[in-house]
Image (cartoon, grey):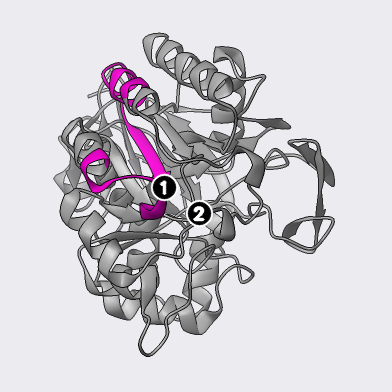
Amino acid sequence: MHSVLTAAQVFDGHQLHARACVGLDATGRIAALWPDAAAVPQGVAVQDLGDVILSPGMVDVQVNGGGGAMIGAATDVAQVRRICAAHAALGASAIMPTLITNRPDVTGQVLAAGIAAARDTVPGFAGLHLEGPHLDPARKGAHDARLIRPMADADLRELLRAAQDLPALMVTLAPEAVTFEQIGQLARAGIIVSLGHSGCSAQDARRAYEAGARCVTHLFNAMGGLQARAPGLVGAALTTGLSAGIIADGVHVAPEGLQVALAMKGPDGVFLVSDAMAVAGTSQQAFMLDGRQVLRAKGRLTLEDGTLAGADVSLPQSVAYLVGLGVPLARALAMATRIPADLIGAVDRGRISAGARADFVVLARDMTVVSVWRDGMLQG
């Protein structure tokens, strides 16, 4: 046994334990979870982290940027490493860097950088997320409408090839911009198909789900609203097995919307995303997005015309927001750890159990980050 940690509360991915003890081995993995110090083998010292919450490192599957950098034309392994490090300090020990709608050559470049990052085992790199370009231009949000286009055979082939060399690949698309057969091919290749930026009918969303789509990107945002006779993508997301990513920042979704989603989807049906941009982890007040300025003010990121452009929130802050709405702490933490980890097949992340990675975030009672651990070692 390399070392043992305990804290006032330990979250294992499912539930909170008072004064549980986490044993770490010398390889940076979790060796055991004991209910209390009395269960720890004799002669093994226990390090008490104090009146804090010891949680698995959080998992963020929608990260457009951080540390002053955006995933895009300048992306290489060094940039991926920089963004992963920025989010680790914010509590997310595993992220999926996300490219929003761009040119085909930029998509290819980002896929190549992700494959190289996987080969180099960049700490915190859990795969790639391509949000677009196969979307509904009428639901573009901050995406560049000039670059949105239907999925061609060449696009499909490129995604299928890349998926073979990435730990996980998520693709956000609109049913209007692809065929159901393409969705099936992506899903059979292990690609996580997420529906978003779409004005599709509930019927087409259900057909996409039946073809293999598994989740919805930032539920309620950039999609048609739930109407009595036109439930749309929101209605399908709430009434099928589709998982739902959601931005819990008090800006993107009203509290009532969050409460409806949580009530409808059950304990494991909703997960948190930050939708973070370049300013995450910095004091920057503005940045450029495809030649357009994005402004940062009062917890919002907007284009100059007021369009929301990503979010200015970390996953621990989102957990705090949910708890403030009355969501049980264990459920809120699961939405930022185990649930997204399971979605992308990262079964050794997002939980505290034997064999999992010893990546932790230590949180104060108000969900501020006290410290971060990677591979069983305190960082910073």
Q: Nearer the viewer, residue 201 or 263?
A: 201
Q: Which mark is residue 202?
A: none
Residue closest to the eye, 285 or 140: 140
Residue range corresponding to the magenta coloring: 157-182
Q: Secondary structure at mark 1?
A: helix
Q: Does the magenta segment cover residue 375?
A: no
Q: Which residue is mark 1?
A: 177
- Residue 70 placement: quadrant: top right
Q: Residue at x 55, y 69 (%)?
A: 321
Quick check: 99 above or below 377? below
Q: Residues within 10 Å of mark 1 (few under 14, many from 20)?
A: some
The quadrant holding residue 230 is: bottom left
Residue drawn at (37%, 68%) of the image: 233
Q: Earlier in the sequence, mark 1 or mark 2?
A: 2
Residue at 24% x, 74% y: name it.
239
Q: Is residue 44 left or right of residue 116?
A: left
Work out whether residue 144 can be spotted: no
State the residue at coordinates (42%, 9%).
120
Q: Amino acid at mark 2?
A: Asp
Q: Residues within 10 Å of mark 2 (few under 14, many from 20)?
A: many
Q: Are marks 1 and 2 in contact (CB under 8 Å)?
A: yes
Left or right: 215, with 305 as reference point = left
Examine the rendering and report whether any part of residue 297 can be seen. Answer: yes
- The percent position of residue 216, horizontal first and vertical second, equals 37, 57
Give the number of callouts: 2
Q: CA distance from mark 1 to mark 2?
A: 7 Å
Mark on residue 136? 2
Q: Does residue 231 sit above or below 313 in this rendering?
A: below
Q: Amino acid at mark 1?
A: Ala
